[in-house]
Amino acid sequence: MGMLVLCLVACSVLVDGGSGAAAASGGKEVHGRTPDMRMPGYLYIRTIGRCTPQFWSSGREPWPNTVPHDSSVSKVFGSRLLERYEPGLTLLEATQRNDDIGGSAFSKLVKQSSAALLNAYSRPGFPYSAWEIKSLVLEALVSESSAASQAEQFKQANEACN
């Protein structure tokens, strides 16, 4: 979070400073930029801690042997997931999903629960055990609000993990 704030402040200074310097120079080139060259007004930053879905999908660390990356989510979490997800969806594909941003709560749930399961198997001290995660996922499938709430809890645990 501190890095994000630092980056946004620095980017804001660069953007504001760049346009102010160009205006003050009477439209001449300043630091390799002309007034017509615009800098982006925002940066999109994804959290890539050691326990997030993005980390697990990157392949930077081997997956636990108990859950290979090509395992289907329905086999890992239970056949009840077939009601919400396609049968061929693998754990790796679940961690790679990007439809969770602005998407359904069930997309967020499968992404965050897959990462949480991997963390439970590979990170000592992770706040959930594997069987707890599997049980909570099945319980969260009853409604969109339950799925959203459980996905947020898994997200917080994943982001707080080292």
Image (cartoon, rainbow, N blue to C red):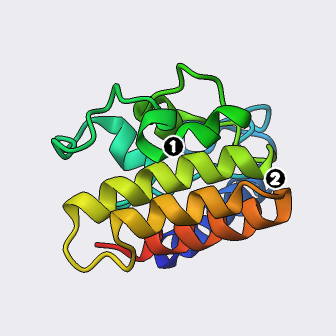
What residue appears at the point 53 percent right and 19 percent down from the top-left corner? 88
Q: In this view, does 13 lie above or below 61?
A: below
Residue 116 picture location, percent across and down: 42, 60
What residue appears at the point 26 percent right and 34 percent down from the top-left corner? 68
Choose between 2 and 65: the one closer to the eye.
Answer: 65
Few, some or many residues within 10 Å of mark 1 (<14, 14–19, 20+): some
Residue 147 picture location, percent across and down: 73, 60
Residue 151 relative to residue 72: left or right: right
Q: Name the residue under label 2.
A: 23
- How far apart are the alpha carbons under marks 2 and 1? 62 Å
Q: Is mark 2 on a helix, strand or loop?
A: helix
Q: Is residue 34 above or below residue 141?
A: above
Farthest-out residue, top: 88
* Comes first in the chain, label 2 or label 1: 2
Residue 154 picture location, percent across and down: 54, 67
What residue appears at the point 46 percent right and 64 percent down from the top-left corner? 133
Residue 72 picture location, percent across and down: 44, 29
Corner quadrant of residue 12: bottom right
Are circles 2 and 1 on residues that touch, CB within 8 Å? no
Choose between 146 and 35: the one closer to the eye.
Answer: 146
Q: Name the residue under label 1.
A: 78
